[in-house]
Image (spheres, rainbow, N blue to C red):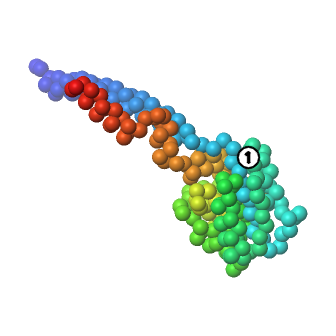
Amino acid sequence: MVDFQSRDTRRMDDDERAEAKDESADDEGEEHDHGDHEGHSDHGHHAHDAESVMFGVVTVSSSREADDDPSGDAIVALIEDASHEVAARDLVDDDFDDVQGTVDRLVRDDGVDAVVTTGGTGVTPDDVTVEAVDALYDKSLPGFGELFRRLSYDEIGTRVVGTRATAGVANGVPVFCLPGSESAVRLGVSDVILPEIGHLVGLARRDEDGAEADDEPGVSPEKGDGDEGSEAQEGTE
């Protein structure tokens, strides 16, 4: 007696094996293509990164003095240790207009590529840094505050809900607002700002038209069209 069920089962097994083999080959091809795409995209994406960044550093505090500013000192040291430079450093009171005016002046300074503030990001009535600087942003960078709070949770637990660290781009300049504690600025500068600052500065000040021209130096679409028309005309004459 012929066991049709066994025969059908074997046939299905063979078909399934062939299908699985084809799917596996397709998956490998997709992974290979995806990897190539990622490599190419990553190279182009970082082509305009800034190698050296000029920082403006602002300490917001009504109780600190220039010679007693451990958080500001920590920011400066970390920046310089990373082979960047501090172009300007200010200490201002917890005053909305003072904070906003100082940051606005720095982002309009051609010698400043990025700004870091420390202090005034809490929830007390005189914590006004976030409100003062937020009004200057052309674009916000919510991922900065999200990541900073995620990393801070490992150190201070649920108290992180009172931290309003924020960032954005104002006049083509990335601005980062950190809490006033030295441990907070060390975390924010070392683990978040410095690893990405060259890339962010490059993107924030990137000239889109200039970037496209750099990709194909000496060639413009208008000129190319004109040349083709000229060649066609020469061929008919």
Q: Nearer the viewer, residue 153 or 174?
A: 174
Residue kind at label 1, given as amino acid type: His
Q: Position of residue 104 (x, y in %)?
A: 65, 66
Q: Looking at the image, which residue sits at the far front?
A: 237
147 lies left or right of 30: right
Identify which residue is drawn at 65% across, 61% down: 108
73 lies left or right of 134: right
Q: Nearer the viewer, residue 156 or 136?
A: 136
Q: Position of residue 32 (x, y in %)?
A: 42, 29
The quarter of the rendered structure image containing the N terminus is: top left
Identify which residue is drawn at 58% across, 70% down: 135
Element assignment for label 1: loop
46 lies left or right of 14: right
Q: Looking at the image, which residue sits at the far left?
A: 1
Q: Is residue 23 visible?
A: no
Residue linked to disc 1: 84
Q: Position of residue 197 (x, y in %)?
A: 64, 49
Q: How crowded is the residue under tag 1: few (<14 C-alpha within 10 Å), some, or many (20+)?
A: some
Q: Nearer the viewer, residue 27 or 92?
A: 92
The quarter of the rendered structure image containing the C terminus is: top left
Q: Looking at the image, which residue sits at the far right?
A: 67
Q: Looking at the image, which residue sits at the far bottom?
A: 125
Q: Is residue 135 above or below residue 74?
A: below
Q: Nearer the viewer, residue 3 or 119?
A: 119
Identify which residue is drawn at 73% across, 46% down: 84
